[in-house]
Amino acid sequence: MNQYIEETKKGLVHTYNRFPVVLERGEGVYLYDTDGKKYLDFAAGIAVCGLGYGNEEFNQALKGQIDCLTHTSNLFYNTTCGRAATALRRITGMDRVFFTNSGTEAIEGALKAARKYAWKKGTGRFEFISMEHSFHGRSIGAVSVTGNEAYRTPFEPVLPGVRFAEFNNLDSVKAQITDKTCAIILEAVQGEGGINPASQEFIEGIRKLCDQEGILMICDEIQCGMGRTGEMFAWQFYGTKPDIMAMAKGIGSGLPVGAFAMTEAVAEYSLEPGDHGTTYGGNPLACAAVAKTAEIFEKKNLVSHVREVGGYLAERLEELASKSGGVIERRGIGLIQGIKVKRPVQEIVSAALDEGLLIISARGNVIRLVPPLIIEKEHIDEMIEKLKGVL
Ligand SMILES: *Cc1c(COP(=O)(O)O)cnc(C)c1O
């Protein structure tokens, strides 16, 4: 067995079933393993590496920052944190940002921000409504609002006061509202849950419900955000705006960084000095990555590129679904798409790997396609050819 695999298996807690591939380097939309085998990447490190691999400008910015300073703590200001916050405010339209080190922490912060808001307003509200088949992370707080029992049950009792509603069913959400409801949390496009986009009526309905009932709307944009839908964030695709949002994955193009953001109306009654903190969050290196990522996205107009190639991906997948007996349906928007297949999805993912194609699965026997946002139509053609062979 490969020495890296052996060492990893021996040393790590067994929380992952990894494929027996050791990835070593990347270039554009391709990855190479330690045997020099080339893979077309339609996973992007789970919707993270939007810029692909080896982006010269991005890498230079990081190298420069490493030579300056990588950590200061939040006891001091640094030279990139403010710039990254300005970039996120610009692309989200939100007013205030808190930097975290992961998506899970962004969710934790978003939940705390909502609870503090209710506490300071003296409403007595503390409950959360979340969606079935949602995924929000693995800490006790995040797992408490994750709509997948397998992830929660072994860790019970989890956070009390969380109610689950059916995604895309507004009546089901209404049925869970009480005078204690603090916030409704949802992904506009469920990722891990099977690539399920919200309907326009559902998102608009949630926004209206929140406004009427004095409930905060929290959007988890960790996977569906940062350009995937062909808008910078998925809620923008629907023309709505949450009160609080969580980001991570794509915002640092591969560096571990997340953030939650809120409107001024929330911030006014929410977290104050002493309420929340993190040692690494907002560190100069992660923030250099966020600021540079946003800059490159805007300069390249990546979202309009996503709209174009995303449309083409949908076309080719529809064609595949109609011609191949092995595909039940296509789902998704832009470059967050999936196909529901008949054969066990892990079998297909594994066979694709042999053919030099990296794809990942999602709930409900779905192949999840979340490639780097820089892919071109020729890469989509290449992926379809490989996938056809595997199916
Ligand atoms: C990945 C993900 C998370 C958790 O992010 P981590 O960085 O893994 O902690 C939360 N919500 C959604 C929608 C995700 O896709």
Image (cartoon, grey):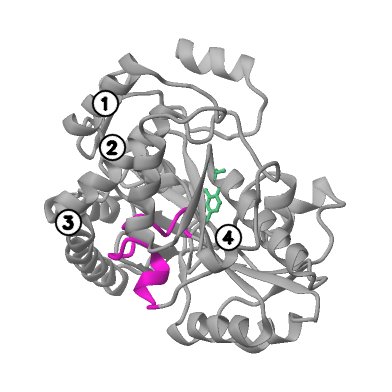
Which mark's residue is nearer the viewer, 2 or 4? 4
Q: Is mark 1 within 8 Å of ligand 1?
A: no
Q: Which residue is mark 2?
A: 356
Q: Nearer the viewer, residue 70 or 160?
A: 70
Rendering quarter of residue 38: top left
Q: Give the labeled residue for mark 4.
A: 267
Q: Earlier in the sequence, mark 1 or mark 4?
A: 1
What label does residue 90 carry, if any? none
Ligand 1 within 8 Å of disc 3? The answer is no
For mark 1, what is the residue? 37
Q: Which quadrant is home to the C terminus?
A: bottom left
Q: Which residues are magenta?
A: 221-239
Residue 229 in magenta?
yes
1 vs 3, front mark: 3
Above-or-below relation of 202 to 381: below
> Outermost residue, right direction?
157
Marks 1, 4: nearer the viewer: 4
Cα distance, mark 1 to mark 4?
50 Å
Residue 253 showing in the rendered view = no
Mark 4 vs mark 3: in front: 4
The amino acid type found where label 2 is placed reads Gly
Find disc 3 in the rendering and name its residue: 301
